[in-house]
Image (cartoon, rainbow, N blue to C red):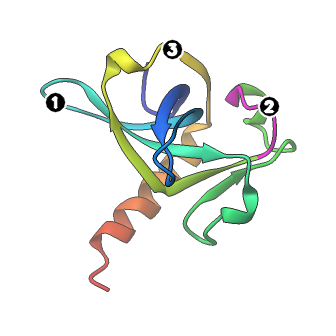
Amino acid sequence: MKAGDIVLAELQQSDSQRKLRPVLLLKQFPPFDDWLVCGISSQIRHQVTDFDEVILESDDDFSESGLHVESVIRLGFLATLSSKDLPGTIGKIQPARYERLLFRLVNFLNNEG
């Protein structure tokens, strides 16, 4: 597995239920190789403009993503997961999309308000 891959993982939802959902691998952290991931949702209406990113069926990387429907990569839905809890990849996104998402996240984190 590598950054930019999409995997299935159990994530805790806002109602405290755990749900198997696709996530995007963002960065792996030392020393235990845990992954910072962001959730992917088919609920496109939850997209935050100029922050999240929607993968449309017409996009070049949709077929490689492993997603079944158009979805939103939600940068505001972050989690850290152990590598052992990630059984394997279902797909990936293009490097350019991955870089855009990281750029947006870093800019958001660096913004003082």
Of all residues shown, which one is farthest toward the left? 31
Is 6 or 78 nearer to us in this picture? 78
Is 2 or 39 nearer to us in this picture? 39
| Amino acid type of the residue that numbered disc 2 sits on in the rendered structure | His
| Amino acid type of the residue that numbered disc 1 sits on in the rendered structure | Pro
Q: Position of residue 56 (x, y in %)?
A: 80, 47
Give the residue pinned by disc 1. Answer: 30
Q: Position of residue 19 (x, y in %)?
A: 56, 35
Give the residue pinned by disc 2. Answer: 68
Vertical side of 28 occupied by 89: above or below: above
Q: Position of residue 43 (x, y in %)?
A: 73, 54
Residue 61 figure quarter: top right
For marks 3 and 1, give the CA distance.
20 Å
Q: Secondary structure at mark 1?
A: loop
Residue 88 got which mark?
3
Q: Residue at x 49, y 54 (%)?
A: 14
- Say which label, 2 or 1, has the lower sequence index: 1
Region in magenta? 65-70
Q: Secondary structure at mark 3?
A: loop
- Where the C terminus falls, by quadrant? bottom left
- The answer to if 16 sits in the magenta stretch is no
Vertical side of 69 occupied by 63: above or below: above
Q: Residue at x 59, y 34 (%)?
A: 21
